[in-house]
Image (tube, rainbow, N blue to C red):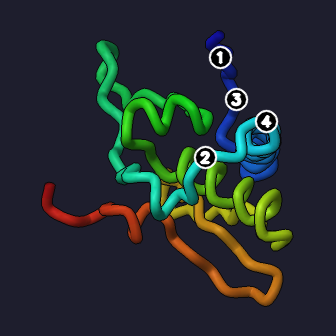
């Protein structure tokens, strides 16, 4: 099933949708114990394609689709990792949103304030 949202890019709305994706991923992790940790899954960062209208497409993917495709962008990777941290390790990490100009980027924030960037860790900015 695909669900579409037309939202104004406000921080609170984006974070609410990422939390929804985290929740769906947590449910998936509860149902299947054999899901690998994000960093051992083989998934790489990949920026989404430009659509026919000339705009970047935003498809938010759950764990099964990420594993099938082997790639995802920042919100996909963070939602996977935060779900894993909460569900499997008991760490109360949260998605953390940054903005540069009109571009948002999603990171992981740990309870102690540390920030982790799964996109960078998994290939963002590296030659393919």
- The residue mark sitting in front, 4 or 1, is 4
Cα separation between marks 2 and 4: 10 Å
SS category of the residue bearing label 3: loop
Q: Who's the residue at 81% across and 50% down the image?
A: 12
| Left or right side of 94 for 65 | left
Residue 58: x and y in percent read 49, 31
Residue 101: x and y in percent read 47, 59
- The residue mark sitting in front, 2 or 3, is 2
**Mark carried by residue 26:** none
Quadrant in which the N terminus appears? top right
User: On the image, which quarter does residue 32 sit in?
Assistant: top right
Q: Who's the residue at 30% across and 13% down the image?
A: 52
Mark closer to the chain start, 2 or 3: 3
Cα separation between marks 3 and 4: 31 Å
Q: Who's the residue at 43% across and 30% down the image?
A: 68
Give the residue at mark 4.
31
SS category of the residue bearing label 1: loop
**Mark carried by residue 35:** 2
Give the residue at mark 3.
7
Cα separation between marks 2 and 3: 31 Å
Quadrant in which the C terminus appears? bottom left
Q: In this rendered view, identify the residue nearer to me: 112 or 25.
A: 25
| Left or right side of 11 for 117 | left
Looking at the image, residue 56 lies above or below residue 85: above
Cα separation between marks 4 and 1: 25 Å
Give the residue at mark 1.
4
At label 3, counting other C-alpha atoms closer than 10 Å, the crowd grade (few under 14, some 14-19, many 20 or more) is: few
At label 1, counting other C-alpha atoms closer than 10 Å, the crowd grade (few under 14, some 14-19, many 20 or more) is: few
Cα separation between marks 1 and 3: 10 Å
């Amino acid at each position: 099933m695909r669900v579409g949202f037309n939202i104004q890019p406000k921080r609170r709305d984006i974070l609410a949708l990422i939390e929804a994706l985290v929740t769906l991923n947590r449910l998936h992790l509860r149902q299947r114990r054999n899901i690998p940790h994000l960093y051992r899954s083989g998934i790489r960062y990949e920026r989404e394609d430009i659509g026919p209208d000339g705009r970047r497409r935003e498809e938010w993917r759950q764990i099964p689709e990420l594993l099938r495709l082997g790639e995802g962008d920042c919100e996909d990777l963070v939602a996977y990792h935060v779900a894993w941290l909460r569900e499997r390790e008991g760490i109360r990490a949260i998605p953390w949103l940054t903005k540069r100009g009109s571009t948002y980027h999603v990171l992981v924030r740990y309870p102690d304030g540390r920030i982790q960037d799964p996109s960078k860790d998994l290939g963002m900015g590296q030659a393919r």
